[in-house]
Amino acid sequence: MLAELGFIATFLAFLAALYAAGVAFHSVRVRDDRLLLSARNAALATFPLLGVSLGTLLIALLTQQYQIAYVWNVTDPNTPTFFRVTALWGAQAGSLLFWSGIMSAFAFGTIVLNWHGQRRLMPYVIVYTMLTLAFFLSLSLFFENPFERYWIMPDNNVVKSVFAVGGAVPPASARLAETANGLNPLLRHFGMIVHPPLLYMGFVGFIIPFAFAMAALASGDLSTNWIRATRRWTLLAWVSLSLGLVLGGRWAYDVLGWGGWWGWDPVENAAFLPWLVGTAFLHSAMIQEKRGMLKVWNMFLMLGTFSAVIFGTFATRSGLVDSVHSFARSDIGFPLFAFWFGITAVSIGMLLWRWRRGDLRDERRLNSWLSRESLFVLNNIVFVMLFIAIFWGSFGAPIFSELFMGTTITLGKDYFLQVTPPLFLVLFILMGVAPLSAWSVTSLRRLGKALIVPASLAALIVALLALLQPAEPPVLLIYGIIALSGTVALWETVRGAMARHKSLGESWYRAFTALIARNRQRYGGYLVHLSVAILGIGALGSELYQQETQRTLAVGESLELGGYVMRYDGFLGGQIAEDGRIMDIAQVTVLRDGREVARLRPRRDFYPNAEGMNSMTIPAAHSTLENDFYVLLVDWETISARSATFKVFINPLINLIWWGTLLLVIGTIVAMYPDERIALVTAKTAQPSQLAGAKA
């Protein structure tokens, strides 16, 4: 019953999405508000319908309905309840349905919140969101159905179908439970549990500004309405994608056991590409809002962001690339590619049509290469150059070589570390200079004067970093450039609070909070810039100054690395956890300057299943602001009560990455919240009409 109910709800949501898209488009042509209202109601109905679909699948996972193929594939009787819930997105079929559920939730919120304020754009917004939703639901219905069940035919062949097959009977539940696969051990980590939903929210969230951009092109409302209506949706998508990327890195750091957090894997890059273009859009959208400029460029960036989202989904789910992060090769590859190609071609065609008609003319021109507008344009160009370089290294070169040269060329980590650092360095320079420049025109003298205090603060930070981690002069210079991008943001905020404190006599706390409340977009952005600087310093330090060694130690023996001493104390073998996994644990003591600083337990976990054992190596780490002492049991060597082989890393400043990400989330939340001054203006504008209504 659960399988049939979930399938029917999914199918009804698919029909509702198709109906909403078709009727919304027709309502514009015939100018019938009743049809548009019907389309809106159908679009809203997809959300509860998919809630039923996801709910039935979740119930099936929790109640161990192994006759449903998806449940059998991602759980077993030993799977804890928490991981049964997260198994909802643990494999291709469930994650696609989960993706569609998130998409319908975003569409529901968008339609409800913008129905009255953006009535001219809403028909086309419904068309594009519902067509996209219908496409992804079609993948769930016809290619990767999470509700298929196992049936035994009279000839003993096993088939999969949602509904009963003539003459077939379901397999015995006990037999299915014995052979169930269970969740992939690599997914039993907090980072990988939260990482996929956040990535999906980031990917799906960008569908909303894309739909509004396309609605603006289709309707001819090419003002800043579509940007204003979607600013918070865009920020929500961006911060979700940012957090998802970093949590994916944390998962790799904790689970994959290579001592790093970002390996320039093609699937990692597939999620990073829309982040790059989306970040460029967030910067240039401010120029259009404030100066009426970059209209064509903003359209191009938003269409590019959505195209990158769909291409990244195609690359990850089709088997185009082979990666520990990706799903297995699947039949959905061609439909995804066709959808990506079609919607990208239509989007570019509409943009070119409006551009040739002259409907996207800018209201102002660039006056100076030192103006804030010009520096933002340079910032955007660098983001696009990074996009091109990373896309070529991840997908362009391998695909081109296979199609035209008959061989596959893979560009590894060395390529990315040669190409991307200079571009990132330019970005940090622009992050430091752009906030100090003025709109329209700025002089070098003014910029130089404004840089004095932030540059002094950056020099102090570099001196502190040199004490924590000695570095060569070129690296210290790079540290200084990255630090400057953060100190500029910090100083501009402090300077604003100082002005309020001095002129209005407010307390420091009141001056600071009132300053942010008056312009949350600006000061939230400064906080994000500060967080990116912190993250950049952590990434640079951990990449350049990582130390590692590998040794086989007998019990009681020690190794030394980077001022630390690690002693092998003993071995606990065959430990059984509550979820049924078997653990081999090494016990080690870490000392520094003769003083014990940590006792760590690196281990290897073994997960029994029908095919034998799946194993996973779990590192242990002693973390400080200065560095991580990271210990890994080498899984290709024997571990015993007498000896074990350890691989040890020291990762300087790596924890700045995680703390910087937390600050980034806080900054984005601040930027998303409505400004006090905007609320004040809205209230004053609304007051006369309210009074008139009262008098009437």
Image (cartoon, rainbow, N blue to C red):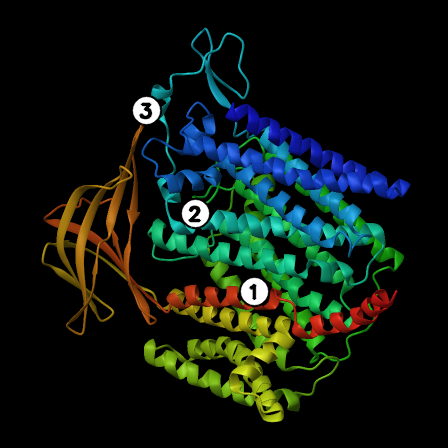
The residue lying at 47 percent from left, 83 percent from top is 458
Q: Amino acid at mark 2?
A: Ile
- Closer to viewer: mark 2 or mark 1: 1
- Is any atom of residue 410 visible in this view? no
Towards the viewer: 73 or 329: 73
Considering only vertical position in the picture, is 379 above or below 255? below
Give me the C-alpha separation between circle 2 and circle 3. Answer: 25 Å
Q: Secondary structure at mark 3?
A: helix
Considering only vertical position in the picture, is 334 above or below 283? above
Considering only vertical position in the picture, is 681 above or below 18? below
Residue 261 shown left or right of residue 357 in the figure: left
Q: Secondary structure at mark 2?
A: helix
Residue 487, x across and y down, in percent: 51, 80
Q: Amino acid at mark 1?
A: Ile
Nearer-N-terminus badge (2/1): 2
Q: For residue 178, which numbered disc appears in the image? A: 3
Give me the C-alpha separation between circle 2 and circle 1. Answer: 22 Å
Q: Amino acid at mark 3?
A: Glu
Towards the viewer: 31 or 153: 31
The residue lying at 78 percent from left, 54 percent from top is 116
The residue lying at 79 percent from left, 42 percent from top is 37
Residue 343, x across and y down, in percent: 72, 43
Q: Quadrant of the C terminus?
A: bottom right
Q: Are marks 3 and 1 in contact (CB under 8 Å)?
A: no
Q: Which residue is mark 1?
A: 669
Q: Which residue is mark 2?
A: 193
